[in-house]
Image (tube, rainbow, N blue to C red):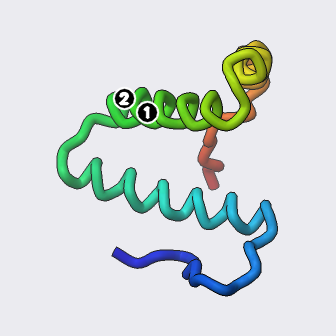
């Protein structure tokens, strides 16, 4: 398994946007490996959401996360999470 970014002790932390890019790379790699091993995409999505919300609640608390998710329906409807492939 290759890793997109190396985090070593003694280095300054990466800027937030670079950490997010690295995190997405790790998640995409783990997702692909799980799919290759036969794990259903829907199961992966639900487990990922659970893990993500559990981390957010642990960091920010239930009220803050509840407020954050209130806006998710509109964001989904606006296409923020849609990955569309352009046809050429």
Question: Above or below — where is 32 with respect to 19?
Answer: above
Q: Which residue is mark 2?
A: 42
Asked if residue 27 shows in the view, the reply is yes
Q: Residue at x 58, y 59 (%)?
A: 23
Q: How many marks?
A: 2
Q: Quadrant of residue 52?
A: top right
Q: Which mark is residue 55?
A: none
Question: Residue 18 at x, y = what percent?
Answer: 73, 68
Q: Residue at x 60, y 47 (%)?
A: 85
Q: Residue at x 70, y 85 (%)?
A: 11
Question: Residue 36 at x, y = what percent?
Answer: 23, 54
The single residue placed furthest to the left in the displayed view is 38
Q: Which mark is residue 45?
A: 1
The secondary structure type at the circle numbered 1 is helix
Asked if residue 74 shows in the view, the reply is no
Label 2 close to label 1 by CB (< 8 Å): yes
The secondary structure type at the circle numbered 2 is helix
Residue nearer the viewer, 62 or 28: 62
- Where, quadrant-wise, is the C terminus in this rendering? bottom right
Residue nearer the viewer, 31 or 65: 65
Q: CA distance from mark 2 to mark 1?
A: 5 Å
- Local crowd at mark 1 within 10 Å, few (<14), some, or many (≥20)? few
Q: Residue at x 61, y 66 (%)?
A: 22
């Amino acid at each position: 398994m290759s890793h997109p970014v190396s985090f070593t002790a003694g280095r300054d932390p990466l800027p937030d946007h670079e950490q997010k890019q690295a995190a997405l790379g790790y998640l995409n790699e783990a997702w692909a490996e799980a799919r290759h091993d036969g794990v259903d995409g829907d199961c992966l999505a639900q487990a990922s959401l659970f893990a993500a919300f559990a981390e957010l609640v642990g960091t920010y608390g239930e009220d803050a996360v509840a407020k954050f998710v209130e806006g998710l329906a509109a964001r989904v409807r606006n296409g923020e999470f849609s990955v569309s492939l352009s046809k050429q």
